[in-house]
Image (tube, coloured by chain):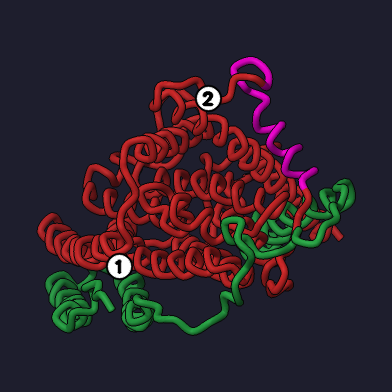
């Protein structure tokens, strides 16, 4: 009997990763070997619609949606708990439904709260 | 000794499967570019590529050669390491997602069972999510590392958009897990033996389709690229093969989402008369054509509309759908 999963599941994933990275890296190497490199003062200037580049892009500015990232962080972790529940759902009949309703209900409070606080509005500054 | 030989045989089968899948995936991703350009051109009443070969069929080859011989520049002031890694992250994560997609019944070769999937992970669905979230890093890092204003704005938009649409994407699949009682893609296909899940879960299908379009940054959700305001968004500074990787990564992404959508909602490789692999390809192509059609039809959303659609419409709908599935599921049982 030929083992269908030599060394477990993740060997295949690792091999796939190697193949994927090879697919990404090999053309770059080929391209580096055959490309003729150009010369010129402004060749590597950052593109700004033909104007001379003004300053760096790494400055401080307001990321309007950073609060979303915080809600996402809280929310996504909880969503993950719903998945294992899904695999065994229906074993305890009504109790399951009640528990899911309670869980999802508390979870949606996060959205309701953010909504009421006006996080989802785009404010002009 | 015998065990050793058998192990090597298993390893070789794995390698062969991997090669075939990668080859087929990249071939179709390349030709999807041609399909998209042709179909989009027809939607806009023009011809599309028709110079390279009959019907422009050699266009993908010409594109690849062009990308290979174009110089690949790194802009002044960029963070070199991250700038070089970012496109590889996008391409590799897109390809990796395909490793859990089953494309046929178990095959019997010389009395041995060969499952037609690279690896049937018991957490297949979660693996797809993990990879799809990791793809954000390519966009955000690429945009940030270019040290270009357009790139940075594109990267930030990409990050905001992808975290917002990952939630409805995940929530829309909880009902699927509830129905299939498993994360394994093979078992999910097996659970659709009689009817594909789209019949039971049309709402989940719609939410999943919309969010996966947003995750692959297609029009109407292409704000991270938004040509007419951000030049090319997060890949403004990329050229040559590195741009090619972002570009091909997008098409691999479409293929992968097509495949996952078929596995989760359209019954995977199941279908009458034709061989399973052909059915899977037909379904993937149908999803891809749908995405191209949407691109030809809809205008781009505004940034705040995009976020509002995700948080105010899709997430509440997905939550309600979970509860409805739970209630109906109990009534049937």
Along the horizontal axis of the image, is A10 left or right of B140? right
- Whole-angstrom CA distance, mark 1 to mark 2, is 46 Å
Label 2 crowd (10 A; few <14 / some 14-19 / many >=20): some
Residue A22: percent from the left, percent from the top? 76, 56
Residue at image location 59% in from the left, 72% down from the top? A54
- Quadrant location, the C terminus of chain B: bottom left
The circle on residue A121 is none
The answer to whether residue B159 is above or below residue B289 is: below
Judge by depth and name the residue closer to the eye, A102 or B107: A102
Q: Main secondary structure of the magenta part?
A: helix
Observer-nearest of A14 and B8? A14
- Of the 4 image quadrants, the one containing the N terminus of chain B is bottom right
Across and down, in percent, residue B102 comes to 52, 47
Q: What color was chain B assigned in the picture?
A: red
- Depth check, front residue: A14 or B62: B62
Identify residue for label 1: A86
Q: Is B55 rendered above or below residue B318?
A: above
Q: Which chain letter matches label 2? A: B
Q: Position of residue A10 (x, y in %)?
A: 64, 66
Left or right, B49 with reference to A34: left
Residue visible at 15% across and 72% down in the picture: A97
Q: Quadrant of residue B183?
A: bottom left
Q: Is residue A51 left or right of residue B224?
A: right
- The residue labelled by disc 2 is B48
Quadrant for residue A104, please give it: bottom left
Horizontally, is B225 left or right of A118 in the view? right
| Residue extent of the magenta highlight | B52-70
Q: Tell me which chain the residue with mark 1 is part of.
A: A
Q: Colour of chain A?
A: green
Q: List the single residue furthest toward the front.
A: A51
Which residue shows up at 53% across the image and 69% down it?
A: B152
Judged by depth in the image, the label closer to the viewer, 1 or 2, is: 2
């Amino acid at each position: 009997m030929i083992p269908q999963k030599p060394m477990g599941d993740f060997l295949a994933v690792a091999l796939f990763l190697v193949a994927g990275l090879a697919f990404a890296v090999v053309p770059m190497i080929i391209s580096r070997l055959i490309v003729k490199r150009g010369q010129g003062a402004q060749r590597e200037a950052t593109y700004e619609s033909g104007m001379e580049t003004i300053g760096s892009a790494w400055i401080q500015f307001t990321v309007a949606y950073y609060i979303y990232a915080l809600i996402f962080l809280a929310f996504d972790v909880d969503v993950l708990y719903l998945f294992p529940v899904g695999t065994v759902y229906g074993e305890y009949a009504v109790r399951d439904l009640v528990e899911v309703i309670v869980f999802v209900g508390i979870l949606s409070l996060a959205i309701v709260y953010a909504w009421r606080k006006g996080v989802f509005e785009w404010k002009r500054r | 000794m015998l065990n050793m030989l058998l192990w090597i045989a298993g390893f070789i089968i794995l390698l062969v499967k991997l090669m075939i899948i990668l080859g087929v995936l990249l071939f179709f991703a390349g030709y999807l570019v041609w399909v998209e350009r042709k179909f989009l051109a027809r939607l806009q009443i023009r011809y599309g590529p028709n110079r390279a070969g009959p019907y422009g069929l050699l266009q993908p080859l010409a594109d690849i050669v062009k990308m290979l011989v174009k110089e690949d520049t790194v802009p002044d002031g960029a963070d070199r390491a991250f700038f070089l890694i970012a496109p590889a992250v996008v391409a590799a994560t897109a390809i990796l997602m395909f490793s859990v997609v089953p494309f046929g019944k178990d095959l019997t070769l010389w009395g041995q069972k060969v499952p037609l999937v690279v690896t049937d992970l018991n957490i297949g669905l979660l693996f797809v999510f993990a990879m799809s979230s990791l793809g954000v890093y390519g966009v955000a890092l690429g945009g940030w590392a270019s040290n270009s204003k357009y790139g940075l704005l594109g990267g930030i938009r990409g990050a905001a958009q992808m975290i917002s649409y990952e939630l409805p994407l995940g929530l829309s699949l909880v009902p699927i897990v509830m129905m299939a009682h498993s994360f394994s893609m093979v078992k999910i296909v097996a659970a659709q033996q009689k009817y594909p899940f789209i019949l039971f879960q049309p709402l989940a299908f719609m939410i999943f389709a919309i969010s996966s379009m947003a995750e692959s940054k297609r029009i109407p959700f292409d704000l991270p690229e938004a040509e007419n305001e951000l030049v090319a968004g997060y890949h403004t500074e990329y050229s040559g093969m590195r741009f090619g990787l972002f570009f091909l990564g997008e098409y691999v992404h479409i293929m992968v989402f097509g495949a996952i959508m078929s596995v989760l909602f359209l019954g995977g490789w199941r279908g009458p008369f034709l061989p399973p692999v052909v059915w899977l390809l037909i379904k993937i192509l149908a999803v891809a054509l749908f995405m191209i059609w949407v691109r030809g039809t809809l205008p781009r959303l505004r940034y705040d509309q995009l976020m509002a659609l995700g948080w105010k419409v899709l997430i509440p709908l997905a939550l309600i759908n979970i509860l409805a599935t739970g209630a109906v599921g109990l009534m049937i049982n």
